[in-house]
Image (cartoon, rainbow, N blue to C red):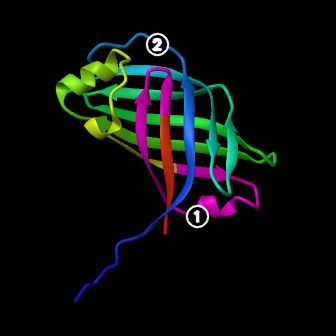
């Protein structure tokens, strides 16, 4: 007897972010990890029922663990094609074999199948049209590109 059913995912949109060259790292902090801050300068979200641009000024506060795993803490502002403002935050993780993470760190293109890159967005808006986004969970898969990052975002049903 199955007590729980696994949730299903519904595609929301693809997201491409444009990012600055990272700020200098702090080096290792008290917890043994290094920190980096990367500015988000723009981007686009496009799906069948959702389209938005990323306003400049967001940032990704990254923790780099000793094994090269990256923990993301991103905050960006979206403006939809119909004028709504949506705040988007997400925490994510990117990890894989050491040599793959080193290649990503050098800005090389690495096939997304060679590493794990996932995040969990949260949306916040006062728009009646997009209020449903305040009340759902989302997950995403990611890929690091030499010029930025791209994600596929899904609504958890």
Identify the residue at image location x=56%, y=41%: 15
Can the viewer see residue 8 in this picture? yes
Q: Residue furthest right?
A: 83
129, 49: nearer the viewer: 49
Q: x, y percentage for residue 68?
A: 24, 26
Q: Is residue 151 left or right of residue 85?
A: left
Identify the residue at image location x=77%, y=48%: 84
Q: Secondary structure at mark 2?
A: loop
- Which residue has dot 2 on it? 23
Q: Residue furthest bottom?
A: 1
Q: Residue furthest top?
A: 24
Identify the residue at image location x=54%, y=63%: 136
Magenta residues (range): 122-149
User: Which mark is on residue 135?
Assistant: 1
Q: Secondary structure at mark 1?
A: helix
124, 40: nearer the viewer: 40
* Residue 133 is one of the magenta-drawn residues: yes
Q: Is residue 10 above or below residue 111?
A: below
Q: Earlier in the sequence, mark 2 or mark 1?
A: 2
User: Which mark is on residue 22?
Assistant: none
Can the viewer see residue 30 in this picture? no
Residue 7, image quadrant: bottom left
């Amino acid at each position: 007897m199955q007590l729980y059913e696994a949730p299903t995912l519904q595609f929301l949109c693809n997201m491409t972010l444009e990012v600055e060259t990272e700020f200098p790292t702090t080096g290792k902090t008290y917890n043994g990890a290094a920190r980096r801050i990367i500015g988000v300068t723009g981007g686009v979200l496009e799906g069948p029922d959702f389209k938005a641009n990323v306003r400049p000024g967001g940032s990704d506060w990254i923790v780099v663990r000793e094994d090269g795993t990256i923990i993301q803490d991103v905050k960006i502002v979206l403006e939809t094609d119909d004028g709504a403002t949506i705040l988007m935050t997400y925490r994510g993780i990117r990890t894989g074999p050491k040599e793959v993470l080193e290649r990503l760190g050098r800005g090389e293109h690495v096939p997304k199948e060679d590493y794990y890159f996932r995040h969990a967005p949260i949306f916040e808006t006062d728009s009646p049209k997009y209020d449903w986004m305040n009340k759902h969970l989302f997950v995403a898969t990611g890929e690091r590109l030499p010029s930025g990052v791209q994600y596929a975002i899904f609504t958890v049903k």
